[in-house]
Amino acid sequence: MPVTTLDPKAALVVVDLQKGIVALPTAHPAEGVVQQARLLLDAFRRHGLPVVLVNVAGGAPGRVEQSRSLASLPADWTELVPALDRQPQDHVVTKRTWGAFTNTDLKDHLTRLGVTQIVLTGVATSIGVESTARFAYELGFNVTLAVDAMTDMNADAHHNSITRIFPRLGETGTVAEIIAKLDQRSA
């Protein structure tokens, strides 16, 4: 479903646009995703709406077949990319699971601000973005997904999330469409 509206109190949640993640090979150039996310960041900040910047610094406990150790990664792996231009009013969430809500203060932060809708962007579409979208939906937030401001390490997984999963969790649209909805509210 295309973007029909943005709630008066929407928040932008930017998932895992950090040095270590954007350096990985992705289906679409990570630089373009960061640029699109920056356009959304500028628009949300201009409209005085909340911004949440998420990074990942660990993994959930338990056995998995495709484990990755974060112990041997470079020291700056978890640092947000400078292009996000982190501002003092931005809320930063460090997660240790796929989704940004699990064992973090994200839900409490958004609830305290009266947020009823989140707009999501980031990497990886089928992991961090999708997990965060699923949990937001379950918590009762309206969800909008900026499909041209995300990518995945796997093109098929990206396509599956955008075409099959996201339309069941919320509305999908482009960065330009989302910004146009923000600007219409101020007109």
Image (spheres, rainbow, N blue to C red):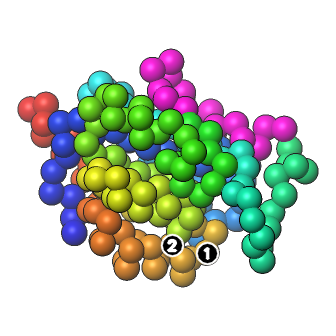
Q: Is residue 21 left or right of residue 47?
A: right
The residue shown at (45%, 20%) is: 89
For the residue marked with disc 2, what is the amino acid? Answer: His
Disc 1, disc 2: CB below 8 Å?
A: yes
For the residue marked with disc 1, what is the amino acid? Answer: Asn
Residue 62 percent across, percent down from the top left: 75, 65
Label 2: how many residues lie within 10 Å, few (<14), some (14-19) or many (20+)? many
Residue 149 percent across, percent down from the top left: 45, 55
Magenta span includes 68: no
> Label 1, label 2: how many angstroms apart (C-alpha)?
6 Å
Magenta segment:
75-92
Label 1: how many residues lie within 10 Å, few (<14), some (14-19) or many (20+)? some
The residue shown at (21%, 58%) is: 3
Is any atom of residue 19 visible in this view?
no
Residue 155, compared with residue 121, is above or below; it is below
Q: Name the residue nearer the viewer: 38 or 53.
A: 53
Q: Is residue 178 left or right of residue 79?
A: left
Magenta span includes 85: yes
Residue 139, compared with residue 78, is above or below; it is below
Name the mark on residue 158.
Answer: 2
Name the mark on residue 154.
Answer: 1
Residue 126 percent across, percent down from the top left: 53, 68
Residue projecting furthest to the right: 72
Residue projecting furthest to the top: 88
